[in-house]
Amino acid sequence: MQNGTPGWVKVAELSEVPEGKPKAIQMGEGRSIALFNDDGKIFATDNQCPHMGYPLTRGTIRNGILTCDWHRRSFDLEGGGCFHVECDDLRVFPVEIRGEEIWIEPGDMEYRRAEEHKQLLREGLLSEDRWTMSKAIALLLKGGVPEEEVMGSILEHVARHIPSAHGSEGGADVSKLINGLRVGSRYEGEDRLIAVTTSACSASGEARQRLEVIPLPEPVTWEKLSRWVRVFSFEGQASRIERCLFTAYHKGDAEKLRPLLFECAFEPHFIDEPQIPLYVSYLSEVVDEFGWDRTADLFFYLGADLVGHRPQDPERYRRDAINILKEMMPTIEGAALERTNKFDEDSFVEALTSVDLQRSFEEVGAIISDGVYLDKVITTLVLLAADRMANTPVNVDAGWWNLTMELNLAASLRSAKEMGGDLIAAKGLFHVAWQIFADRWINIPTRLLSEELSKEKLDVANEEEGIETVISTIESLNVQDVGPQVIGYLNAGYSAQKLLLAIGHSVLWDDTGSEVLPTLRTVFDEWNNAEGHPAQAQLLVGLARYVTDIRSNTDNKSAATTAMNFAEGRTTIEVFEE
């Protein structure tokens, strides 16, 4: 190829493109243009089919219509229009014949199809088609559309999908949405695409417009609305809560809504519903990430559905827990919080793992009354949950759902403290303590967090070999060996962050990735909070054992890799030939 007139490029000799024999021309890295001779006239198009990237030089032409040979998508050869509504139009290029030379004008290649690809993403979300979602997200990101804007399009779908199909179960959708974004921000390229696409997949499905909610008629005050929300939450009246939240927002009380939801979520009657405060925490983060303008409707509906959830009638131990907590509330609410670092962690851990509910709650009440800094206690709860993950027996039911709930609920108390205040976070300590008591059936050996871990070092030549060893063990599903290997890796002085990123990469490529996202994000966030603690390593050990034991070894690599290559302009044949 030669450059001539500005904007025009010589791409071939006329003799190189006889009728019926298309020619592919490479135009810079990763881009292929197809030349066609149809009835003596030369045409130039992208060689990549807009549907799934098949090379169009392998297609057929009839009546001026170019048809891809893979999925039979058809295009106007001259204008590029696609005759199938679920496919983008094909990019075409001006052609000039100069003597015996073919020249084309490739243009500036500037990305101008963001709205089309947002619509493609919406179609993928509705159809639950992973390839369509991956393709649309890859094209948007490659085109320079900010990731937050792409996630915002997914959020718009979530706001309709949850009321249409999921109800309070939509908290899991929001969990994957925000945790996919948080985890994805630590990666680049295909890893990042997988994290974002996993978030999208978790929220895909039916999505209908809802009836419009309107504010309650005046006179209403914040005092009335907040009181009604508390009453309706206790009574399990979710539909009534939504209109109260909507009204408060439109009266200018938006910033009071999240503390109110946290307050309701940590009431005693939700003591055995750990997903309620956890999902409220994630919903609060979505507001921080995207702002009220984009999240208000989702917040009103899902927030109401969460704190308006009606728990089942309590069985004996939960009834005892509710009664103990109610009796302790006046003391807790009157305590002077956040005033001392003095904290007997061993005594606290012994009480929580004693399988004695009264003792456990009394110990939590004591540290609150003593005014121990809540962040210090939260770190202990996070590490206790991680330690339990690191030591849970795996020859029977390891209880991963329960243990990761302990971990993520404990970590969410930081958000509850920041948004709802010290008292709400203090009440949340009891909910984590209950969860540990409720998980007593897992029969995890008790261990104080102050006890030293193994000092053995992993016998490898260097850090890279150490990471390869651990990841190989995870991918071979060897849960018995992975824990000691992680400890040995850290004892050798190698980077915890590099290993954590490598574990995350392995998780993202596996089909269990969506399940692991919240816990992976928690370990990322909590690693530095645990700096200097003798049990810090258990965060990585617990994560490694968890992802190994639940791993499916069926990955998402094909869709993500193909989508990335598609966004770069490469054809599927080029990718497969590599």
Image: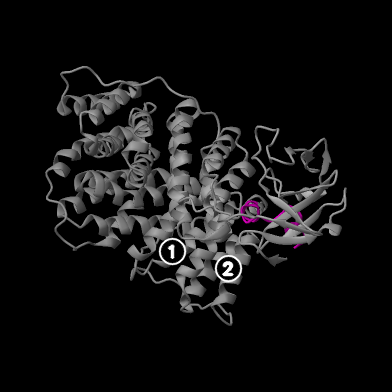
Kindly report the secondary structure that dominates the magenta region of the rendered protein: helix
- How would you rate the neighbour count of disc 1 (Cα within 10 Å): few for under 14, some for 14-19, many for 20 or more? many
223 vs 510, left or right, is: left
- In this rendering, the answer to whether 206 lies above or below 387 is above
Q: Position of residue 163 (x, y in %)?
A: 45, 27
Residue extending furthest toward the front: 99
Instruction: Kindly identify which residue carries mark 1.
Output: 538
Question: Quarter-wise, where is residue 233 in the image?
Answer: top left
Q: Position of residue 261 (x, y in %)?
A: 28, 36
Under circle 2, the secondary element is: helix
Residue extending furthest toward the bottom: 461
Task: Return the residue nearer the eye: 6 or 400.
Answer: 6
- Residue in the picture at 87% in, 49% down: 19
Verify whether residue 386 appears in magenta: no
- In this rendering, the answer to whether 315 lies above or below 396 is above
Coloring applied to the structure: one colour
Q: Position of residue 159 (x, y in %)?
A: 43, 33
- Residue in the picture at 46% in, 60% down: 186
Q: Which numbered tag is attached to residue 470?
A: 2
In the rendered structure, which segment of residues is drawn in magenta? Answer: 563-578
